[in-house]
Image (cartoon, coloured by chain):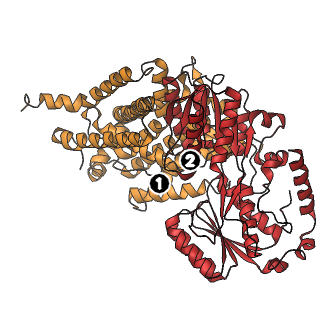
Chain colours: A orange, B red
Amino acid sequence: MQKSSTLLDLAIKYGFLALMAGLIIFFGITAEGFLSPFSAVFILQSVAITGILALGVTATLVVDGFDLSIGAVATSALMLSAYVMVVWEMSAFWAVALSLAMGAAVGAVNGMMIVKFKVPDLLATLGMMFLLLGAQRIPTEGRSVSTGMALPDGTIANGTFSDTFLMLGRYRIADLVPLSVVFLIAAAILIWAFLELTRHGRLMYAIGSNAQAASLAGTNVNRYKILAYMISGTMASLGGILLSARLGRGDVASGNNLLLDAVAAALIGFAVLGAGKPNAFGTAIGALFVGILLQGLTMLNAPYYTQDFIKGAVLVVALVFTFALSGRTGRAKA
Amino acid sequence: MISRRVFTSLLGAAAMLPTVGFAADMPAPFDNAGDVKIALVRYLSTGDFFQAYLSGVEKQAEAIGVDLRVFDSRQDAALQADMVDQAIALGVDGIIIQHGLTESMQAAAQRAVDAGIKVVAFDVNVENDAIPQVEQSDRDLARLALEAAVEDNGTEWVAGYVYVPGIAPLDRRDETWVEVKAANPGINEVAMFGTLDNPIANSVANQARAVLSANPNITVMFAPYDEFAKGVKIAVDEAGMTDQVSIYSADVSTADIAAMREPGSAWKATAATNPAVVGEVSVRTLAMLLAGEDPGHNVIVPPTLITQSMLNELDISNMEELGAKLPAFAHADVAVPEWMPLPAR
């Protein structure tokens, strides 16, 4: 048994990484300019925001939950940070602090609804998604926030995006590595270390595989679930802040694509290294994988619908990988 | 330009006069304008464009003195058709249909016409000879922007083009791009990309970054929708190619003006129709119908070219100033019979 399954084990464990290496070689040959440090940085930057959201959603997946509101939280943070600076004319610090606090608070409310009021996770976060989509538009009557905009009461907003804030999305270390990429890497390491190395992280995995058993073993299940949603909300608002700094305006947007891309990255992450479970390293690789694909395809002039198609195909393959193959040996959940 | 300006200021001055002065001069049924009820039935409403459109409708309705009801279906095609029936039941005299799907609105519009109600449609083809179509000319938008590109860059350049097929206004803008390319063989389109993934500017920026690194010789980006242009500008700035690339687009908003006026901005020009003006024209067209006049079947609101240098010279920083300092943008001389009161500016 041990011997005959070695090849399969290898395929499960390293198949995805091998596929990614193959992709890089393929694009390196076919797309001129793909194998340059600039290109690598572009890819990281293009996945930074969805990657950060995906890391948040990973935390909720770990406790066997799900957060549908991350896209809406991100766009709410985008609007809020713009509103704080442009309308209230406050500093970058407050824009960041209030947005992060908003994200954490939304996460806490999500968690409370789920553990205290027993609302199923998908429904609670779906409700929150709609609530935020509406709420973020009320202060501006559905318009985007930008300097010089007319407010509902007829006055003109004179605040500007502070340079410090814009740096979050635009500054590049040594003229190459954008700050958003640094945030992604830092977030990935933090979430990974928290989930894999601390007792709290292991307890969260325990809750995810069997909440009742974890509870009987003395874990405060509710507290950890709420914590997971708070991590998710905070990560999503961090993504929204970076988006705001990159766009330089508070754009009215649904954020649904952010949600879908982030969830796709987290699910692809299940398959990386044959983990068969949500994990931060896999999520980061999953986001990177999608980023490499899209960057390469765009460089080859592939239209957007083929990109959606290929994104979907990758996700389907990754899920089959996870649930069919890893299920034989791993601890994949049904 | 001068005559247009004089004309507009005259109109502006005229509109300052009390509306009562006009009431006597307006043809029936506007001699009792307060008794005239009109309905605006909307399909799309969120976003800067639709907000401005609504404000134009409200201002013109106020100037004439009619009673305006707004129905907002929020992208629900079936609900929008029901709302037309609601308006019929309410006994309105006129209906403006703003956007929607031909399939769902055609029958509803016909029911309104059968009930003796005058109907005007904006940016939705309801396939009805009795219903005038108000349109912003997408072909003219693209033509103006591309003329500016040719004027600035000559007829030989390497171009990147942002386009998502299947969206009616973008398809119409694309027709002009195809024509211009055919007429100028020196224009070499090396990349076509685009996406409507939300937030659009961010997704397009990611694509544009890839395109620019694959084609570092691009000098002109044609992005005929302002969200596209915003995304391309982000990518151009990030790639440090601001000096080399020029962006030409369509549509405008306060935020776009700020982006175009950033020092050294690559966004050189945009062609736009003022959505508020389109709203005003929609109401005026309906008013003409109600007064028994013929506005014509296709009422086209002409666009204006807005260049970076224009914005800088006139020191324009938002849409209000754009309207105030660029009179061509503040008013379209469309559907303006002599008796028509215009909104005060």
Tell me the kind of residue under disc 1.
Answer: Asn
Q: Mark 1 lies on which chain?
A: A
Q: Is mark 2 on a helix, strand or loop?
A: helix
Q: In which quarter of the image is residue B282?
A: bottom right
Please provide percent x and percent y for residue A232.
46, 44
Give the total number of marks visible in the rendering.
2
Tell me the kind of residue under disc 2.
Answer: Leu
Please provide percent x and percent y for residue B275.
70, 54
For the view shown, which residue lies furthest in the front direction?
Answer: B183
Q: Nearer the viewer, residue A87 or B27?
A: B27
Horizontally, residue B80 falls left or right of residue B132, namely left
- Residue at image mark 2: B170
Q: Which chain carries label 2?
A: B
Please provide percent x and percent y for residue A64.
33, 49
* Residue at 70% in and 28% down: B152
Quadrant location of the N terminus of chain B? Answer: top right
* Residue at 88% in and 75% down: B23
Q: What element carries label 1?
A: helix
Q: Quadrant of residue A194?
A: top left
* Residue at 42% in and 40% down: A54
Q: Which of B115 and A87 is in front in this view?
A: B115
Q: Nearer the viewer, residue B293 or A56?
A: B293
The label shown at residue A250 is none
Query: Is residue A249 visible in the rendered structure shown here?
Result: no
- Residue at image mark 1: A110
Residues marked 2 and 1, same chain:
no
The Cα atoms of the two marked residues, 2 and 1, are separated by 40 Å
Q: Say above or below: A188 vs A54.
A: above
